[in-house]
Image (cartoon, coloured by chain):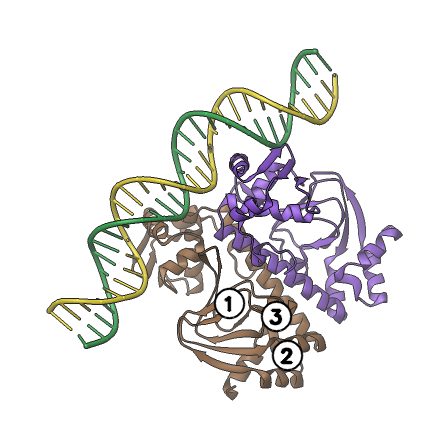
Chain colours: A purple, B brown, C green, D yellow
Amino acid sequence: MRPDDIPMIRNLDLFRSMAENRFDILAQAAYLQTFPPRVDLITEGDRSDFLHIVVEGAVDLFAGWNGRETSMATVRPVSTFILAATIRDAPYLMSARTLEKSRIILIPSEDVRTAFDADNDFARAVVRELAQCYRSMVKAQKSLKLRSSLERLANYLLRHQQRTGGNATFDLPHEKRRLASFLGMTPENLSRAFRSLQAYGVVVDGMQITIGDADDLRKLAKPSPLIDDPTS
Amino acid sequence: MRPDDIPMIRNLDLFRSMAENRFDILAQAAYLQTFPPRVDLITEGDRSDFLHIVVEGAVDLFAGWNGRETSMATVRPVSTFILAATIRDAPYLMSARTLEKSRIILIPSEDVRTAFDADNDFARAVVRELAQCYRSMVKAQKSLKLRSSLERLANYLLRHQQRTGGNATFDLPHEKRRLASFLGMTPENLSRAFRSLQAYGVVVDGMQITIGDADDLRKLAKPSPLIDDPTS
DNA sequence: ATGTCTGATTGATAATTGTCAAGGTCATCC
DNA sequence: GGATGACCTTGACAATTATCAATCAGACAT
């Protein structure tokens, strides 16, 4: 692993309070790899061999059943994924593939579990991280069950606007087909949803979105901190 | 708290490996209460005051938005709920109400967090529990996004048949309207889904279900361990 | 520039799911 | 027994969402 990457990892919530020597052991066992876009990293059902940390780029978590496929989440730097499978030593429930060129750190699950058993601060950090992941999963499910696809899209746009700095104009972070899958709809339906949002002042030009009147859009979206606030 | 309840709690995965004196402190801070059916226990958005443990009865976790409401999960003895909110000291994302007469233990969140910070074995147990909760949430979301309501119902019936011992005939555990909400559909749609399943050998008589030919039903349901296996 | 590819859009249509209104069933309570 | 009420079911209809086929737009390579 490149020495300049170590401080970044060290600074993750997950590792920040870990004992020095323990962290060094983990860091030495870890691999850093660079992957091109669209590379499959893990496949659901496989045994959990490595904890993954995205250092650069972006990773799509997705799942399939009976020939269908859906995008569950996007992992952006710097964060881990499939922590739960690693901890429980259970098969992955989701597959992962790079969306862009990505640098990813792989730590053998075995070593993570050892650190987890031996280092109390680390165990506590894992809990906080997991509780966070759990809560965002609950929010996603609430969004799916309580909202129509149009409402989900409206809330997604408002949230993404915040994330990107709050400007009226911003770019979508990935292909629309993936956004559609993430929101639980088809690409065709997403196209039509975007057109419906014109009535609420949303202008779409390729990947570039302009929210003309956020208050107007908010009247439709009715965002709630218990669904849309990423931090709560 | 009644002395006979203590061993049962003690035996939960969550508390089994906790230090003796630490457990005693928690047990002394805890309340045991009996609630009639349909009593609201917690409301989403509230601050997390107590970790709840269902000792007897059943509790519905549900969520609302914009006048709509959906059932997220049913908690049955003996297990905890809203652990994640307690750990993160964050507002509840779901409301809870008793389905039946229930006995519930309440442990002040403050004490749980203290135990969590001081007792490493407990912290590790919390992680395992949370990882489990997270994974079942992922499975639920995969089911929602990848399956039609008919497929969700078919899989639910097969799973519930297993849970209740594997007999061809068994009873639904709660009202159909709640089952509908849990499966993400309306009561009317559930009624029609049950009728569609007649073609696959499912007989419905009130709350009593008979699966005439499980293999036939399985051809429709296509159950997958990565969605339907509660343990994996 | 031309062709090729991938992803996005559009239109037509169908399937799925939801809504509303009306009955039906069953247990419970006077 | 008959009324009451809660829940479930059914039918007719509407909204939402998906599917299929065709076209379009832009990126890229030849």
Give SS at disc 2: helix
Q: Residue at x 61, y 39 (%)?
A: A212
Give SS at disc 1: loop
What residue is pinned by disc 3? B86
Q: Quadrant of the C terminus of chain B?
A: bottom right
Q: Residue at x 85, y 66 (%)?
A: A20
Query: Horizontal and vertical percent for residue A167?
Result: 68, 43
Q: Residue at x 80, y 59 (%)?
A: A11
Of all residues shown, which one is farthest toward the right? Answer: A3
Q: Within 10 Å of the Cα at label 2, are there few (<14), some (14-19), or many (20+) other Cα atoms?
A: some
Residue type (three-letter) at the residue carrying disc 3: Thr
- In the displayed structure, C22 sits above or below C8; it is below
Q: Earlier in the sequence, mark 3 or mark 1?
A: 1
Say whether residue B47 is left or right of residue A78. left
Query: Horizontal and vertical percent for residue B99?
Result: 41, 69
The chain to which mark 3 is attached is B
